[in-house]
Amino acid sequence: MKIFRKLGQVAVVGGALALVVACGSDDGPSSSNPAGPPGTATELPATDAAPLQDGECGRLPEGDVAEAIGPNDGGQHDYLLGGCVWTSTAGETEGLVEAIHATVLPAGQYEAVAEAGEPVSGFGDGATYADLHGELWFPCRSGDFCGIKANISDPDRREEVAMRLGKVLQGRV
């Protein structure tokens, strides 16, 4: 029964993401409201850092992604987890096309899609890491969860990449 509940939650999240993509715009915040719609957390960081590119796919610098998976597609909307996925353009490595996923989800969506992992330090209470898919989740912003998924064929690098990119994401949201 638990599996049906989980599948139902995934279907709801998927439907909501499809609706947002079909009805929304990827053009970023409007000029009349640079912080985004009321009640959203899309404020730009108050730093002198380079501006984020294309919203979701600007959460990780291209150089950090390229260091992790090499040449890549520059990032696309991630229909599975939300956020952005960067996919290697170098082809398969040990039967896997390497990719990096980065997302920020409300707690309810996080609970529906996140892989359960072991507690991990350095990212606050409630942070977990699951080695099978290199999936790191940690609390960020007010009540949201940040996620990094490092689909990397080398298991020795997978955790290192997820943790390193998690720190980058943590510093940018």
Image (spheres, grey):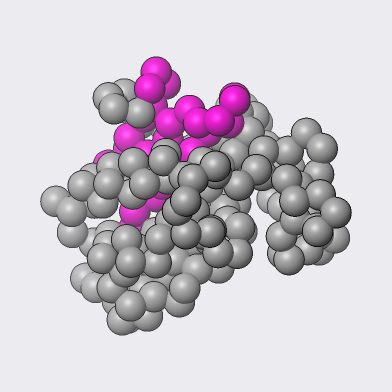
Taking the view exactly as shown, the residue that stands out farthest to the front is 48
Verify whether residue 9 appears in magenta.
Answer: no
> 64 or 154: which is nearer to us?
64
* Residue 83 against residue 85 in the figure, above or below: above
Quadrant of residue 26 within the rendered picture: bottom right
Kindly report the secondary structure that dominates the magenta region of the rendered protein. strand
User: Left of 71 or right of it: where is 52?
Assistant: right
* Residue 63 against residue 120 in the figure, above or below: below
User: Left of 35 or right of it: where is 83?
Assistant: left
> 3 or 136: which is nearer to us?
136
Quadrant of residue 112 within the rendered picture: top right
> 135 or 35: which is nearer to us?
35
Verify whether residue 125 appears in magenta.
Answer: yes
Residue 104: percent from the left, percent from the top?
Answer: 55, 42
Taking the view exactly as shown, the residue that stands out farthest to the top is 125
Q: What stretch is highlighted in magenta?
A: 124-151
Using the rendered image of the protein, determine whether residue 134 is visible from the camera's viewpoint.
no
Q: Residue at 59% across / 25% down in the picture?
A: 142
Which quadrant does the N terminus fall into?
top right
Quadrant of residue 70 within the rendered picture: bottom left
Residue 52: percent from the left, percent from the top?
Answer: 53, 58
Q: Residue at 35% across / 28% down in the picture?
A: 123
Taking the view exactly as shown, the residue that stands out farthest to the bottom is 90
Using the rendered image of the protein, determine whether residue 110 is visible from the camera's viewpoint.
yes
Number of numbered discs on residues: 0
Residue 129: percent from the left, percent from the top?
Answer: 32, 35
User: Left of 107 or right of it: where is 15?
Assistant: right
Q: Residue at 39% across / 67% down in the picture?
A: 62
Residue 38: percent from the left, percent from the top?
Answer: 82, 37
* Residue 156 against residue 123 in the figure, above or below: below
